[in-house]
Image (cartoon, rainbow, N blue to C red):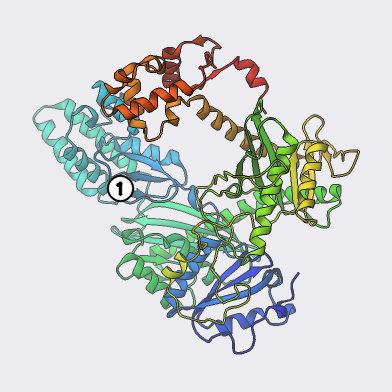
Amino acid sequence: MADPSSYRPKPGQIPDSPGVYRFRDEHRRVIYVGKAKSLRQRLANYFQDLAGLHPRTRTMVTTAASVEWTVVSTEVEALQLEYSWIKEYDPRFNVKYRDDKSYPYLAVTMNEEFPRVQVMRGHKKKGVRYFGPYAHAWAIRDTVDLLLRVFPVRTCSAGVFKNASRTGRPCLLGYIGKCSAPCVGRVSAEEHRELADEFCDFMTGRTGTYLRRLEKQMMEAAEEMEYERAARLRDDIEALKKAMEKNAVVLADATDADLIAVAEDELEAAVQIFHVRGGRVRGQRGWVTDKVEEITTGALVEHALQQLYGEETGDAVPKEVLVPALPDPLEPVQEWLSGRRGSNVSLRIPQRGDKRALMETVERNAQQALVLHKTKRASDLTTRSRALEEIADALDLDSAPLRIECYDISHLQGDDVVASMVVFEDGLARKSEYRRFQIKGFEGQDDVRSMHEVITRRFRRYLAEKERTGEWSDGESTLAETPSDSTGGTSSDSFVDTSSDTLGEASSTPSGPSGDTPSDDLTTTSPDVLTSSLKDDDGRPKRFAYPPQLVVVDGGQPQVAAAQRALDELGIDDIAVCGLAKRLEEVWLPGDDDPVVLPRSSEGLYLLQRVRDEAHRFAITYQRTKRAKRFRASPLDDVPGLGETRKQALIKHFGSVKKLRAATIDQICEVPGIGRKTAETIAAAFAQAAPAAPAVNTATGEIMDDEESETTAETSGEPVSAGAPDERRGQER
């Protein structure tokens, strides 16, 4: 626990101007980002007597080891930079709304030649029109199923669409009239796009036009005694009305607004948002957050607005946003929202009428969401806390291991040896920090030696980052280290990032000349320039700078001893090590002749098992992926300058690798795009390659020739390997 006075800036050092500040912990990880109209006044609040601080604010300032800041020109710039840094660093003490990316949208891919209606989640894509979000995907499918009667827009995937175009036969929806079947030319691309535009217009609230048009057509068909057509139009009208009933009118027609309500207690807050478009509720979403510091309802609303509209532009930001409390100050937030939309946005508290009544409904939803969340989380938090305490007691640790890293080795009879590292924080998997290693320091099967190499490489990177500027960076690149000898030194790593989002670790560039003290260089910098400078000098991210409290290895006494030896060689003595053996689920500690046996009902043992099993799953998945790639390899892969197009041309011309192997140089030259020099290189590659082992279908165990194996691999997707499949599967770990 740090004393805030140890890193408090000197009097007069902090400027009295707008800016954004960052608190860092002893590992230089950003733990809190905030903005202020006056940096001097705001930061002074953090360095008062600890007894006068909110308990969570007190925890933050005692966890921090330094503070730095950046001056900006206006409060709007401060708001933008704060949002960018919160997204970049993911600080542990900032308000973070969970489950933001889980809500499904009804999307129409207007950026395609034949637009498609589908359910989409995650980040929004350019050229795609979104409606929602919806609470459940089935609600979207129910709505689409009703609307396809009137607007038969394509809903199939690209593969189904191409297959129907190739065969000239539409899918089932085309036969039953719920798709206009552009894949077989029943409608042109222009006609299909018009259908998609009408679908989008209906979803945006322009419903009266289509209903009146269909009713007119129904009456005309009845007058002309085309009763079957009139009946179909009648059913279409009923389908549209039923779809409209799912979104009842709540406000005056053509009203576009978002309503935000907050329910809170001293520790947590729940936020609910209703999206009203065309006077109807078109979507609903909700978040829950921990109140990591003393924060007002207006500040919670401001964070919710950042989360909602930080990456939105144009009509995605409504003309009117109704909130329970206004941010303070209001003008910068309102100016920021207007800039995102491109026109004025009204941010206000509803006082009376239909909008106030709807706000009360949103508030009731927020209250129910908070109660439900606390009910679910109570037992979960209790269980995880008990598990961590039991592990600390069993292993004689000073405190509960809030960050646990687990390592596992996987191979198949000594081939494709890989390792995995999984991370659990507060008892929950943190998948953005999972890593995968290739063992390249030696060849063959040696789990103990492999474990020593992996632990050495991981913590050598930790020491290297610690010795450097001490700053953090994140990204999604592959790291390579120096090749190693057999003593467990570093070797070429393949670290594969499993996350689709940015990592939760902080990343920054020094604000001051030293990089480890508060900045004296108080220059005004734009948010765009600052955000672009958050990478390392060589453009690669800095990894592995955050140490665990506990290292778990999958194995018994030998693997634990290897891991401990690796840490000892690096001079690291503040990280605990244990191993979990599969046979009897025994916990092994370094240097102990007898294992620690936890009760079968122990929550601590259950947590260790989950960590171990996750590491095993992650490692064996990577190993199987590498093995499948190796089984599909051919001598053509080693021919320099021979790409996929010419490889396919060669196989298509000769029919199989076996016939290509037997071909002469002149015959190879007959393939379009293959010159004599390339043909000679191909022939030489086959001459140097070892004779191929018999190909085996892993599904049946049947030995096949080259033609059969290629056909099987293409049609079934199963890897074709050499050797008895059952025997090889039995040696996999």
Image quarter where the C terminus lies is top right
Q: Which residue is drawn at 89% across and 42% down?
A: 592
Q: Residue 381 at x, y = what percent? A: 71, 51
Q: Is 434 left or right of 530, judged from the image as shown?
A: right
In the image as oriented, which residue stretches furthest toward the left? 224
Q: Residue 595 at x, y = what percent? A: 87, 38
Circle 1 is placed at which residue position? 203
Front in this rendered view, residue 544 or 20: 544
Q: Is 590 left or right of 330, judged from the image as shown?
A: right
| Quarter of the view holding residue 231 | top left
- Mark 1 burial class by Cα count in 10 Å: few <14, some 14-19, many 20+: many
Q: Which residue is drawn at 84% across and 44% down?
A: 589
Q: In this view, does 520 lie above or below 468?
A: below
Q: In this view, does 537 lie above or below 709?
A: below
In the image as oriented, which residue stretches furthest toward the right? 593
Front in this rendered view, residue 566 or 167: 566
Total residue callouts:
1
Q: Which amino acid does label 1 sit on?
A: Met
Front in this rendered view, residue 37 or 464: 464
Q: Which residue is drawn at 50% across and 84% down?
A: 17
